[in-house]
Image: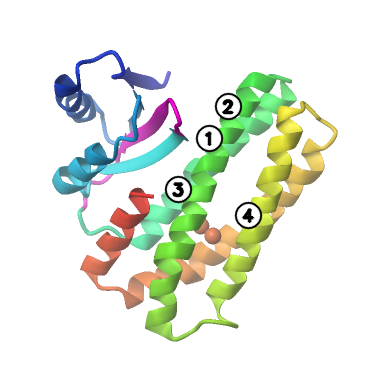
Amino acid sequence: MEKILDVREMVPKDRHSKIFGTFKELKPGESFVLINDHEPKPLLYQFQAEHHGEFNWWPLETGPQVWRVAIAKREVNDSKRTVTEYLQTDHKRLDNIFNKFLEDVKDKNWDKASKDFREFRIGLKRHIRAEEDILFPVFEQKTGMHEGGPTAVMRMEHKEIQELLDKILSATDSKDSAQIPNTTNALVNILTDHNMKEEHILYPESDEFLSEAERSEVVKKAQAF
Ligand SMILES: [Fe+2]
Ligand SMILES: [Fe+2]
């Protein structure tokens, strides 16, 4: 069962100590979902300042009334973070949510399908934005490869991926099970290949070109998206 900490009814001054207490009690590999009534950015910055090597931060719902974020304790506590490890962990996490969504559709559990797909879509869009706005510019600058380089291909594929996300969302919201197999298969095909290229080429090369401080900076900026 997923651990949930809803701080909306708590007096603001007690919230942070409760949240950090809950994080402390997690075993490596465990996570909890924080529910809040505003974007918890100051909390993220406090986590980054005090627990940089220990946690992952995965927004699941981003307003306008409710914010939910999964806060995970990493298996390893290592402040030397890498682009590869951070973004590859996010790929795996997103794959898991997507598989839950496919199960929901199979069970015709449309409410859960819609909730799970929204989590997936928010996570993947955020992941893509972090790549395009934070990682790719650094990669392009360090390698001198712009057009014709790997990031240009990745950007094109991101467009296709985002179009498919919109199509699947509207098929899910209209409970149009006939449209789901085509669009989800197309997404799986493109994502499998795309993620593999990133994990085997783009991310490791980025780690090689970046200094330890720059790698940490990419992770911190990506978390704050
Ligand atoms: Fe990507
Ligand atoms: Fe990626």
Marks 4 and 1: which is nearer the front?
1
Asked if residue 181 is positioned above or below residue 113 in the image, the reply reads below
* Crowd tier of the residue under label 1, counting other residues whose Cα lies within 10 Å: few below 14, some 14–19, many 20 or above: many
In the rendered image, which residue does mark 2 sit on?
115
Tell me the tag on residue 119. 1
Q: Is residue 91 visible?
A: no
Whichever of labels 4 and 1 marks the residue nearer the N terminus, that label is: 1
Does the stretch in magenta take in 119?
A: no
- The residue under label 3 is which amino acid type? Asp
Q: Are marks 1 and 2 in contact (CB under 8 Å)?
A: yes
Residue 4 image offset from top left, x and y in percent: 36, 20
Whichever of labels 3 and 2 marks the residue nearer the N terminus, that label is: 3
In the rendered image, which residue does mark 3 sit on?
90
Marks 1 and 3: which is nearer the front?
1
Boundaries of the magenta span: 62-78
Q: Quadrant of ligand 1?
A: bottom right
- The residue under label 1 is which amino acid type? Glu
In the rendered image, which residue does mark 4 sit on?
191
Whichever of labels 4 and 3 marks the residue nearer the N terminus, that label is: 3
Asked if residue 55 is positioned above or below residue 178 in the image, the reply reads below
- The residue under label 2 is which amino acid type? Lys
Q: Is residue 181 left or right of residue 112?
A: right
Marks 3 and 2: which is nearer the front?
2
Asked if residue 213 is positioned above or below residue 167 in the image, the reply reads below
